[in-house]
Amino acid sequence: MADEMVLRAQRFINTTYPNMLGIPKLEENGQTSWTVMYALTRALQLELGISSLSNNFGPTTLNALQSKYPVLNGSTVPSANFARIIQSALYCKGYDGGEIDGKYNDRVAASVSKMKSDMGVAASFPDSGSLYPKVVKGLLNMDPYVTVNGGSAKIREIQQWLNGRYIGRQDFFIVPCDGHHSRTVASSMLYAIQYELGMADGVANGNFGPGTKSGLAGHTLSEGSSGTWAQLYSGALILNQRATTPFTSVFNSTVASETAAFQAFVALPVTGKGDFSTWASLLVSYGDQNRRGEACDGVTKITPARAATLKAEGIKYIGRYLINPTGGAPLEKEIQAGELQTIADNGLRCFPIWQTYGRDAEGFNYPAGNADGLAAVAAAQRHGFKTGARIFFAVDFDAYDYEVTDDILPYFKGVEDAMALSGNPYRVGVYGPRNVCIRVSEAGHATASFVSDMSSGFSGNYGYPLPANWAYDQIVTRTVGSGDGAINIDHNIASGRDIGEGSFNPSRLDNAPDVAFDLSSYYPAMHTDISTYMKSIGFPDSDAKRIFTHTECLETVMAHDALITSLSNTYNMRKALIQTSAYWEMRHYDAIDLTVDAAVTYYHTGVGGDDISPVRDSSTGIAQISGDVGIRAWNYCIGKGYASGTVLDPAKDADIWTMWHKVNQDNAYSVRTVSLIHLWDAGGKPGGNNGPDGETVLRTMRLDYTQKEIFEVLRRYQGWGDEAEAHATKRMALYQLFEKYNGLSRMY
């Protein structure tokens, strides 16, 4: 909603500093934003004589303001524009800025006084209506100083108290007073602890380092303790959602009771005292890293000797990975043959983890969740996990909150839907930073959380509480044992909400060649599953936009099952690769493709030219293969000895027409060409981001391709760029569905 005075502030910037280097023109929409605050900050820097402008109100700006104008009011403001910057910023913060007329008048002074009161710093500065450098810094940002979005009055009281008590310290700056815990507030608590420990300015740094740890070890609190330490402690409890805790300087019975409840929740010894381990869990995500938990996870095979080491360490639950998505190091990341039986034989239990290659938001979306869910089910069954096990799907990066909304939640909805499509053989867990775990679980997509708390600096951990449904809390990496029993692990605290699995079905590490599809047993279910998935990504079984229905596409692919099986066996290529590309491309055939087909026919034969411009080549046929691509794939495979035939020249119209006509008219020839294109893909098909020298060469085609290799082959079939990447992500789930039923045919 537009605000007239914010609009006037934007116009002030645009008219006063037109075309000014370093101050971009603002959109005049009457809405406050960081963009507006950045422009006001740059304008202030310009007025201060700073030549290198920045969005950041950093030490240079602060020091210049402190040296030139340590107190700003109606008598000391240096210019009308300087005053207008202050007035504009006040309106952007929700306060009265006067008329933006360049006058630091009584209205401005009253608003400054009100803002300082809201900040909690009114008593820290002598003149209520004057601005001081750190207050100006707080003015020129988007931090609220009143509760917003259901903020807690008690948390706001803590924020105001921190501001008022520590604003005079060199490295402490005004924190928001909005009633919400945050990274900034968590950092301010650590500064406060360090100041109370007697650390000097420049020494206190907001880190949970050795000095802070040793200092806290000497400040155990118990019922009856009082003073600033008790005040800080009660504040820390409140920030960790112990809501009935009073913000008090007295460690009373309520504080002791809430301490005991918090200790029980985070799996600390329940003493009711504010000891070091409790302080640590309140202040940083990983807590006391000297704790010994009952769980671990790692990328190393559990041998009998390592199992003995873990048992001696008190470990009961071991997290192991269902796949190694890239196939490279670490070589034992994926569960190894016989490993689960070793775990069970030693009285230990295993919880499965699914992690692919995505370490940023781009790897997460609904189709990727579908594909990963289906692949995780297949991998868990292959390794021998019984029905009912919980698979923890990993988000192994610092996802910002908007990325959780835009990317992570759709991904887990995809996982959830894939699990339902598979008959819900397994439960879904989430591995990741606290905010990811909280939001995925609250959305109903996960039943337990495995929290990556070692990464205390993650924005999704700093300032967030431990999720209510936490099962494992990852706190430190350490090497335990010696000799053959030595093993490097991530040490985890276990809550008991998940206890892994202690018995397993026989594993079936499936590298067997594909066989003929069992149509009578599996076709109806596969037809339904693929239909359900395609509908979920916007492909109804039939619609006016596309030439072929779901049934027609699937029946066409399955009609060539004998050929596809033969190609699979000949080239050591999973049938699902061929089936996926053929089905996907046929499913996309539309009226535009038919028009272009007619234009190509006209170019080469002169037939059918009414209202058509001739086109030399196009993607065509059920597998959408162009004459050029078909020629190059066949030529590559003939040269490698994968196929026999006549080498054609893509520069010759006659040869383009020969290949184009075959893939347009002969479905079997198109299917065969799909397999050759995939061989070409794996061999480093030219083009893409790697330039004319070609794509990265994959391992020679094989039945145990990794998820990354499968994705690359499917992506390269279409080419490169955003569309190819997006389509390959969607085709990964389709691949898993074809592979699911091919696998059943292989087994039975």
Image (tube, rainbow, N blue to C red):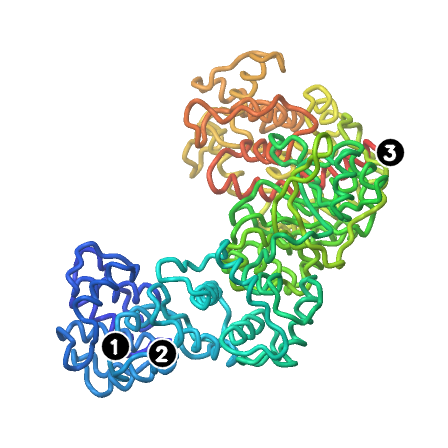
Q: Label 2: which residue? A: 121
Quarter in which the N terminus is drawn: bottom left
Q: Where does residue 149 sit, x and y in percent of width and height?
A: 49, 76
Count of all numbered marks drawn on residues in the image: 3
- Tag 2 secondary structure: loop
Res 87 → quadrant = bottom left
Residue 64, visible in the rendered structure: yes
Q: Label 3: which residue? A: 748
Question: Could you tell me the amino acid type at mark 1?
Answer: Leu
Q: Which mark is residue 170?
A: none
Q: Where does residue 310 sit, x and y in percent of width and height?
A: 75, 42
What's the residue at 58%, 43% (across, down)? 729
In space, the residues marked 2 and 1 are separated at their CA atoms by 11 Å
Other residues around mark 3 within 10 Å, as few (<14) / some (14–19) / many (≥20): few
Q: Label 1: which residue? A: 131
Question: Could you tell me the amino acid type at mark 3?
Answer: Tyr
